[in-house]
Image: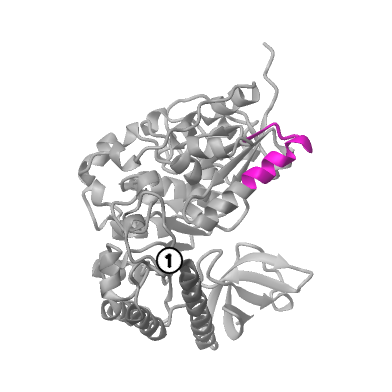
């Protein structure tokens, strides 16, 4: 029997950590089908670009990467460029019409059969582009009914939609040629893991849920990510154990709304019960929770996050604004007073907790009084990191139809104004940490600069700054080690520390 030639694929990931999980699931599926995973798209037969469709700039970045990859087809090995991810799911046929350079635009429903799709594309076929729909309508309206119907709906990052006993075996890319097996019984250790690591970082995102049931007036995510669906705790624990076996020390729990976890499984307190299971896994030293909705944060969750050894003192809270009237217009809840009271609750339990958030300025109808409320909140809140976004219309959202839109230049002025304020406040907060003892997870050792770079407990991956140690004080330290250190200075929001 003549074996088919090996095909190679590069996955280019844009956007958030949730997309990173989706890419590694795709990588696992493709590796199990014999595809060779490569880092550089120019060295691959197929470049699969996992796009982001969150905000206007992210859309532009995704299109730029697709165009760049397509332009390089004549220069290297690449024969096809395929768009997947949120932008492809959200716009589908429209994206394909406007971007003929892409050889295919595939939606989430194609992920389980991605290998055959890519083989067909390399064989010269041009598959029909994804037809977008409101994915909220694919699952029952009642959260408690969703788990029974979830197997029929593609939910990226949740593994195989079939039962654990029938899922395919998936290994690391390095092991693909050694022991790829056909579908069979699930391993004795628990459900299968459909994932292949695409980097060697000592931390990894771990998806606990997908979709969102909230109806924020400015947000389109529920339309293309769908209604809220929790992953089963057994699947999450199995994947965390799999990650630990591959050297991961910190798991970063991601979703569109982690505070809703478990509601469709009949237990809204399920996250509190899951955290100790994750921290008990051999090799997992840190569990970090992301994306908490302030209106849904319960005292029980705060207690669990503050008292469970191994859960880091880190709170990623989506405030978005602080003016009560404007928040109502956004279809959200809260106020400056309520948010500050919540922060007091957090810091009463964990005085050194890291707290980050995002805010939107320039929302339709936003007044100077609204901005004054937001400014007062930010000054009092002492947040470690804040991202500021200027409002822009998102297709299909409620706010797209609002009146009282602010001119683009006014929105830009407000972004600049608050970006400057937030930068100053974040620098002040970093300076407050001088003199603190921190545990730094080493992520990079730069011998040329003489530095060890890592993150303290209050610093989330990629966007919350880093902690820098002098390399000559860290003899014998390797990536993945944890170093106890004393903060002695700052560089912007980055901390400078000396090993204790």
Residue identified by numbered label 1: 310
- Decide: is 459 above or below 397: below
Q: Which residue corresponds to the image point at 64% horizontal and 75% vertical from the top-left? A: 468
Which residue is nearer to you in this view: 88 or 291?
A: 88
Q: Position of residue 383 (x, y in %)?
A: 43, 78
Which residue is nearer to you in this view: 51 or 398?
A: 398
Q: Position of residue 131 (x, y in %)?
A: 43, 33
Is residue 21 found left or right of 302 in the rendered image?
right
- Please provide the residue range marked out in magenta: 65-81
Q: Secondary structure at mark 1?
A: loop
- Decide: is 347 above or below 105: below
In the rendered image, which quarter contains the C terminus? bottom right
Q: How many marks?
A: 1
Residue 333 is covered by the magenta coloring: no
In the rendered image, which quarter contains the N terminus? top right
Q: Which residue corresponds to the image point at 53% horizontal and 55% vertical from the top-left? A: 58
Q: How is the image coloured?
A: one colour
Residue 72 in view, yes or no? yes
Q: Position of residue 80 (x, y in %)?
A: 66, 32
Is residue 333 found left or right of 385 in the rendered image?
left
- Decide: is 2 above or below 102: above
Snapshot quadrant of residue 139: top left
Q: Position of residue 318 (x, y in %)?
A: 37, 66
Q: Residue furthest top?
A: 1
Residue 67 is covered by the magenta coloring: yes
Label 1: few (<14), some (14–19) or many (≥20) C-alpha neighbours in 10 Å? some
Snapshot quadrant of residue 98: top right
Is residue 265 found left or right of 500 in the rendered image?
left
Residue 28 in view, yes or no? no
Which residue is nearer to you in this view: 441 or 426?
A: 426
Which residue is nearer to you in this view: 306 or 366?
A: 366
Q: Which residue corresponds to the image point at 45% horizontal and 25% vertical from the top-left? A: 184
């Amino acid at each position: 029997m003549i074996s088919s030639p090996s095909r190679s694929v590069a996955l280019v990931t844009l956007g958030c950590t949730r997309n990173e999980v989706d890419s590694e699931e795709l990588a696992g599926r493709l590796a199990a089908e014999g595809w060779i995973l490569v880092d550089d798209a120019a060295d691959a037969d197929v470049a699969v670009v996992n796009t982001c469709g969150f905000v206007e700039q992210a859309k532009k970045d995704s299109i730029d990467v697709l165009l760049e990859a397509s332009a390089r087809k004549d220069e290297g090995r690449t024969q096809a460029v395929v768009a997947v991810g949120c932008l492809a799911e959200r716009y589908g046929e429209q994206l394909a019409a406007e971007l003929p350079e892409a050889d295919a635009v595939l939606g989430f429903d194609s992920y389980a059969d991605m290998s055959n799709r890519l083989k067909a594309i390399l064989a010269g076929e041009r598959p029909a582009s994804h037809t977008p729909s409101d994915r909220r309508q694919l699952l029952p309206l009642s959260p408690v009914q969703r788990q029974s119907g979830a197997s029929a709906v593609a939910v990226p990052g949740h593994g195989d939609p079939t039962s654990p006993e029938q899922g395919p075996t998936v290994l690391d890319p390095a092991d693909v040629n050694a022991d790829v097996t056909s579908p069979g019984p699930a391993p004795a250790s628990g459900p299968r893991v459909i994932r292949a690591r695409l980097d060697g970082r000592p931390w990894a995102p771990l998806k606990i849920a997908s979709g969102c049931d909230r109806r924020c007036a400015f947000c389109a995510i529920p339309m293309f990510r769908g209604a809220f669906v929790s992953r089963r705790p057994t699947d999450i624990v199995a994947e965390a154990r799999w990650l630990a076996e591959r050297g991961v020390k910190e798991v970063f729990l991601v979703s569109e709304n982690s505070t809703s976890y478990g509601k469709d499984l009949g237990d809204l307190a399920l996250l509190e019960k899951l955290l100790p299971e994750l921290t008990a896994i051999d090799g997992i030293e840190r569990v970090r929770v992301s994306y908490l909705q302030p209106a849904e944060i319960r005292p029980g969750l705060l207690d669990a996050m503050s008292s469970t050894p191994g859960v880091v003192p880190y709170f990623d809270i989506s405030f978005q604004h602080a003016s009560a009237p404007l928040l109502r217009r956004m279809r959200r809840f809260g106020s400056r007073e309520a948010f500050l009271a919540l922060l007091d609750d957090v810091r009463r339990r964990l005085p050194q907790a890291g707290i980050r958030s995002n805010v939107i300025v320039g929302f339709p109808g936003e007044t100077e009084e609204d901005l004054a409320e937001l400014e007062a909140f930010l000054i009092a809140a002492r947040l470690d990191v804040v991202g500021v976004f200027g409002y822009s219309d998102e297709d299909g959202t409620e706010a797209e139809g609002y009146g009282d839109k602010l001119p683009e230049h006014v929105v830009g002025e407000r972004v600049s104004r608050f970006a400057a304020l937030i930068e100053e406040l974040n620098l002040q907060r970093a300076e407050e940490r001088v003199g603190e003892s921190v545990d730094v997870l080493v992520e990079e050792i730069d011998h040329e600069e003489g530095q060890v770079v890592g993150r303290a407990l209050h610093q989330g991956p990629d966007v919350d700054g880093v902690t820098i140690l002098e390399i000559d004080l860290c003899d014998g330290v390797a990536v993945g080690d944890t170093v106890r250190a004393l903060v002695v200075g700052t560089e912007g929001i980055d901390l400078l520390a000396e090993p204790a």
